[in-house]
Image (tube, helix red, strand yellow):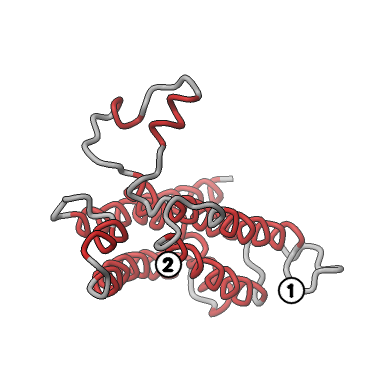
């Protein structure tokens, strides 16, 4: 998809530019009146830098709008989690307000598991954009590009857990515990990486099935 670049100063199709703009605005909105003003900016301000990098990378080559949508959806989920520093995303209260079953009670969750959803989303939503970029920018076959994308997710997930650990070493005890979202689970980092792994393999499987169906047509 080449899209219509007319009147677009950043050189992206209008739909993609709109997705990035909405995501950036959402990230800023999630910082307004946050219940955790001392910690939420550490989660969400880097998101704006990531968006700027993605805009630059997506200009050449132009990526599918579906790939841009995947990255923006992940960043939107992250921004929401960052607003509540992940451990305190009130999804049960939201469900109760809408008259729906509370996910925590329905699934028998012993902790706030919004972070698990986002780690799974990291794997599920980044494989397609990365593989598309590798294929279009460097001419790597889609099969190999998908493999590299899965490996990127696994490595990125591990590096993030290490970064989170190093950052919390410089924080006071309560702030460190709130920021890293461990919630008393000594296996939190491993479970987060496992969620990302499942998401990445799920995305790779879906992409493979899509290609097989397209060949069948």
> In the displayed image of the protein, which residue is found farthest to the left?
186
13 shown above or below 10: above
Q: Residue furthest bottom?
A: 138
First of labels 2, 1 by sequence position: 1
Q: Quadrant of residue 9?
A: bottom right
Closest to the observer, 8 or 66: 8
Residue pointed to by mark 1? 10
Q: How many marks?
A: 2
**How far apart are the two marked residues, 2 and 1, measured between alpha carbons?**
27 Å
Q: Residue at x 32, y 49 (%)?
A: 87
Instruction: Please tell me the numbered disc located at residue 24.
Output: none
Q: Quadrant of residue 192?
A: bottom left
Identify the residue position indicated by label 2 in the image: 42
Which residue is rendered at x = 44% and y = 69% of the image? 145
Say what secondary structure mark 1 lies in. Answer: loop
- Left or right: where does residue 155 sit relative to residue 186? right
């Amino acid at each position: 998809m080449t899209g219509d670049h007319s009147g677009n100063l950043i050189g992206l199709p209008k739909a993609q530019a709109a997705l990035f703009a909405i995501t950036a605005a959402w990230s800023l909105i999630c910082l307004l009146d946050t219940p955790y003003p001392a910690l939420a900016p550490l989660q969400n301000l880097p998101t704006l830098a990531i968006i700027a990098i993605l805009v630059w990378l997506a200009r050449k080559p132009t990526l599918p709008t579906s790939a841009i949508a995947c990255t923006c959806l992940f960043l939107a989920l992250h921004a929401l989690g960052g607003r509540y520093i992940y451990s305190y995303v009130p999804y049960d209260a939201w469900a109760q307000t809408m008259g729906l079953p509370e996910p925590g009670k329905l699934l028998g969750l012993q902790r706030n598991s919004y972070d698990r959803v986002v780690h799974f989303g990291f794997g599920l939503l980044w494989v397609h954009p990365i593989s598309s970029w590798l294929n279009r920018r460097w001419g790597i076959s889609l099969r190999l590009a998908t493999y590299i994308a899965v490996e990127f997710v696994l490595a990125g997930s591990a590096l993030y857990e290490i970064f989170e650990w190093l950052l919390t070493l410089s924080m006071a005890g309560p702030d460190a515990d709130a920021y890293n979202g461990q919630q008393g689970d000594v296996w939190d980092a491993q479970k987060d990486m496992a969620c990302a792994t499942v998401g990445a393999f799920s995305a790779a499987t879906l992409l493979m099935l899509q290609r097989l169906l397209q060949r069948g047509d």
